[in-house]
Image: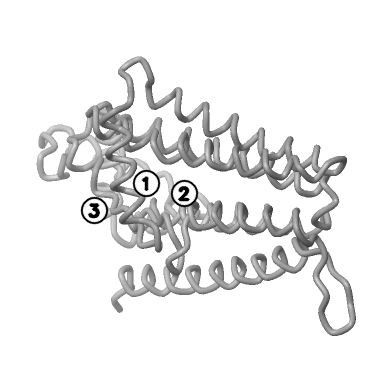
Amino acid sequence: MHPEDVPEKTRHEFREQKIIQGDNMASDGSKTMTELCEQVNPPILLEIEIEMKTRRARPFGEMPIEAQNEMRRVQDSWSAAGEKRALVWLAARTPSSISPDHLTALGLAAQFGAGACYALAAWSRYWLLGVIACLALNWLGDSLDGTLARARQRLRPRYGFYLDHMVDSFGALALMGGLAWSGYMHPWIAMGLLVAFLMLSIQTYLATYTLGEFRLSFWRFGPTELRILLAVGNLALLWKPMFHFLGGEYRLFDVGGAIGLAGMGLMLMVFTIENTGRLYREERITQ
């Protein structure tokens, strides 16, 4: 609802309240920033207050579908095109008894399973094959749930967005915890990767809120590419878990983890600077 659409009586009541508040401020010795702004430009704050009260009276779920779907999904990873075709094919053939929530639960259970297999690999490296199987199941559950909801026109945007990313966070914690326990990666590197993942996630969520742009991949790398790299790394661990370089011997996943950590840190800095500059230009204050 636009401020001009508010009944004149309501606008008049708001103005009377502002006048009363202004009289009260005149008698006070100190002024808050809001009170100072009210004195400088009362009509602006009046319109903001009307808009906020209108929003509270009209929850997100009751807003038009067009307003809810303004968010733009950015998925330009190497596998995006082929993956989309595969997911649409799978969604069309998924039994009606299987819901998107079932797939979300499968993705979470599979990622916890991958973490458990990494921990068990401390006693037998063949558990690394179990990690690969769990990564495949995680891809199926984590990628197909949203596609299935869209194919069936059973969208719940806020619920799906919140649940999916909380599941990803808990899953990342389980995966990195298992890696830290496995002995194939130093715990500090595993912890650094977890922090970097969560920081990139925070950056993504903030960009989604402020820019209306939900980025699923960074520099052509998305979750599917990371799963593939991790699966290939597991096969390499079965063959040669140590890496020799300049006369030194290092754990293969320590080297790979350090490279991944540096790359994620660079992504975080670049996209933070880029989005900050973009928001600064879009909300430039005119003198």
Q: Secondary structure at mark 2?
A: loop
Q: Are marks 1 and 2 in contact (CB under 8 Å)?
A: yes
Q: Which residue is at 30% across, 18% downward?
A: 96
Residue positioned most to the front: 239
> Would residue 217 appear left or right of 252 to someone viewing this image?
left
Mark number displayed over residue 278: none
Residue positioned most to the top: 97
Count neighbours of disc 2 (C-alpha within 10 A) and say few if under 14, some if 14 to 19, many if 20 or more: few
Count neighbours of disc 1 (C-alpha within 10 A) and say few if under 14, some if 14 to 19, many if 20 or more: few
Where does label 2 land, which residue?
A: 27
Mark 1 or 3, closer to the camera:
3
Q: Are marks 1 and 3 in contact (CB under 8 Å)?
A: no
Which badge, 3 or 2, is on the more N-terminal residue? 2
Q: Which residue is at 37% across, 68% downward?
A: 279
Mark number displayed over residue 23: 1
> Would residue 42 appear left or right of 242 to someone viewing this image?
left
Q: Quadrant of the rendered structure where residue 123 is?
A: top right
Q: Amino acid at mark 2?
A: Ser
Mark 3 or 2, closer to the camera:
3
Quadrant of the image containing the C terminus = bottom left
Q: CA distance from mark 1 to mark 2?
A: 7 Å
How many marks can you see?
3
